[in-house]
Image (tube, rainbow, N blue to C red):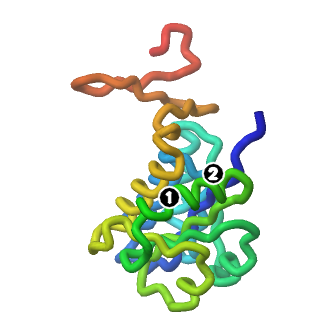
Amino acid sequence: MQAEPEVAVLRYGHRPGRDDRMTTHVGLTARALGADRVVFPGNAGQSAETVEDITGRFGGPFAVEMTDALDAFIRDWEGVVVHLTMYGERVQDVEDDVRAAHETDPILVVVGGEKVPFEVYEAADYNVGVTNQPHSEVAGLAVFLDRLFEGRELEREWADADRRVIPKATGKRVVDPDAADGE
């Protein structure tokens, strides 16, 4: 069985001090919901460190990269570019087309952090809106990835994890997956 083509998430823009938590959550959401890597702007080093730390503790594979050339990254992408924006086509109207494209092509999901220039809209193969209402870009990314993977990402097993969360109705249980008794 051949692996699916890559899904990468590009955080377009980052305002230090203002976007730190949101940029980190874009990376964590990308990781948890099935993307293969996240690419942060060059000034988002703290977010990159946090996502790398979580990947080290809770497993991967998942890659974290940084670039100062966001526009070039989009322009040079060899695959489908999906820009998440409240002004785009409804996710439910394009999800089948995007999923079909992903059968053969890698997908780059662009998630804005500040005002996104019109050139990003033009470079995208799909400008996709989740509800076409103002809301968190993290929520939009989560809904989009769940639609793309049709829920399969929720069953993912994580390799090389130092910790594993055991689902419970109440309370918390985190175990060492390599321990003989799971504790």
Residue designated by label 2: 36
Mark 2 vs mark 1: give the one in front: 1
Which residue does the image show at 50% across and 75% down from the upper left? Answer: 127
**Res. 105 visible in picture:** yes
- From this view, report whether residue 112 is shown above or below residue 173: below
Which quarter of the rendering shows the N terminus? top right
- From this view, report whether residue 176 is shown above or below residue 24: above
Residue 93 lies, in percent from the top left, at 44, 63
Tell which of 38 and 45 is nearer to you: 38
Extreme top residue here?
Answer: 181
**Res. 50 visible in picture:** no
Which residue does the image show at 61% across and 74% down from the upper left? Answer: 125
Residue 32 lies, in percent from the top left, at 48, 45
The residue carrying pointer 1 sits among few (fewer than 14), some (14 to 19) or many (20 or more) residues within 10 Å by Cα, namely many
Tell which of 80 and 178 is nearer to you: 80
Extreme bottom residue here?
Answer: 118
Residue 52 lies, in percent from the top left, at 57, 52
Q: Is residue 83 left or right of residue 131?
A: right
Q: Quadrant of residue 165?
A: top left
Q: Is residue 146 left or right of residue 69?
A: left
Which residue does the image show at 53% across and 46% down from the upper left? Answer: 149
Residue designated by label 1: 95
Q: Is residue 86 left or right of residue 74?
A: left
Extreme left residue here?
Answer: 170
Q: Quadrant of residue 143?
A: bottom left
**At numbered mark 1, what does the secondary structure look like: helix, strand or loop?**
helix
Q: Label 1 sits on what residue type? A: Glu
Q: Report how many numbered discs are placed on residues in the image.
A: 2
Which quarter of the rendering shows the C terminus? top left
First of labels 2, 1 by sequence position: 2
Q: Label 2 sits on what residue type? A: Asp
Q: Which mark is residue 112?
A: none
